[in-house]
Amino acid sequence: MDMDGDAPGGRISTRPDGSILQANRTFLSWTGHDEATLLAGRRFQDLLTAAGRVFHDLRYLPALLLGGLVEEMDLDLLRADGQRLPVLASARLLRGAEGEPERILLSFTLATERRHYEEELLQARRRAEAAEAEARQALLAAQSANAAKGRFLSAMQHEFRTPIGLIMGYGELLVMGAAPAQQREYLTAIQDAAGRLLHLVDDAALYTEVLAATTPLHLTTMSIGLLTRQATQMAAVRLADAGLRVSAMAGPDLSAAMEPKLMRDGIASLMRELASHAPTGARLEVGWVSGEGGLELTLCCEALSPEVAARLQDPLSAENLHRRSLEGAGLGIAIAKQVMELHQGSLRLESTTGGGTLFRLTLPRGG
């Protein structure tokens, strides 16, 4: 196969283990490597930095073997003179007649301008930090104008910084070149923090959407049993990750007037929040009954400690904010409360005889 052809950029082909089979003239020119040396047993991962080799082993290669294609990886190649060459790399896996991995085709484009742009962004960030005192005064003014939004912004500032700080700190340790066993530990911490950050961003976006909802709502009569099953499916990933088992209490199904999407979002958010606080293996019992105040939907978690329940009473409170860990401020509770208020209902937290916590959502009669 002619590796030069008409397509621009550097290109190489390798065996599945990374051993280089071919390299085009552009790649050789960019990196300064001798073709004979590359083809004499060098592997693609040997041309990467320490951080790049970790990425190759833990992310790139598993993704390529699973999906057959990986696009636009931001990497640094090591030139023959030891200098770094920033590139964007894409890889395609070719399989043999029996479906076994046979060869990998990699193409590269220079990312020098992109890195320069990132440096400019860093400079802009430093300039922004110089104006932080003025921005803080503006934030205080906004908090005075709207106390609820002020509490939300204050809580989110802490919740964002905690996982981002872990990502940056452990990432720096990896770049400095820790031992392989430590690198795996650091990567696990990075992935956990990043995952929690993504969940937080999703919850924050949902909270904003719920706050923007207007009344009167367009109500539809819906089965509570169906509603809770749909909400459980929406929260299934977080529930499974936390090992939280969900069961429905026996009893006749009931229906109520509601805005289905809002109510599903509210209950799913409440379940996801409980998954962040309940111990692994805990059970969440869901039930419903027609009470004096209207239809009551209950979520009972016996394993939720009184201390956690007390903190969730006021989910966006700034009190003790900086002593919170990665389980979060309770934004899912705030979402559920807002949804119930939009329905002219309520959400209350009650202690159970077993020392757990019961979340009682009440919808008034007639919607």
Image: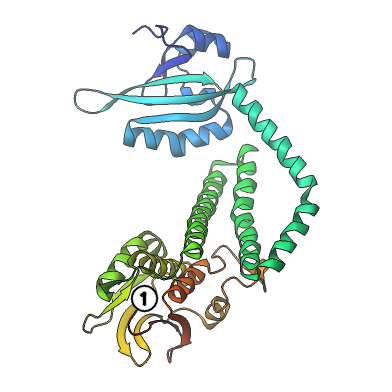
Residue plotted at (59% across, 54% down): 163
State the quadrant of the C terminus. bottom left
Residue at mark 1: 283
Residue 61 picture quarter: top left
Give left or right: position of 131 versus 44: right
Residue 236 picture quarter: bottom left
Which scheme is used to colour this image of the protein? rainbow
Residue plotted at (65% across, 38% down): 176
Residue plotted at (62% across, 64% down): 155
Give left or right: position of 97 versus 17: left
Give left or right: position of 259 versus 323: left
Could you say which is closer to the camera, residue 51 or residue 353? Answer: 353
Considering only vertical position in the picture, is 307 above or below 102? below
Residue 356 picture quarter: bottom left
Considering only vertical position in the picture, is 366 above or below 108? below
Number of residues whose C-alpha sits closer than 10 Å to that of mark 1, classed few (under 14), some (14–19) or many (20 or more): some
Residue 287 location (% of width, % of height): 31, 81
State the quadrant of the N terminus. top left
Give left or right: position of 16 versus 81: left
Residue 73 location (% of width, % of height): 48, 30
Can residue 42 be seen at all in this image of the molecule?
yes
Q: In the current view of this chain or complex, which residue is farthest to the front?
A: 216
Could you say which is closer to the camera, residue 257 or residue 167? Answer: 257
Considering only vertical position in the picture, is 126 above or below 301? above
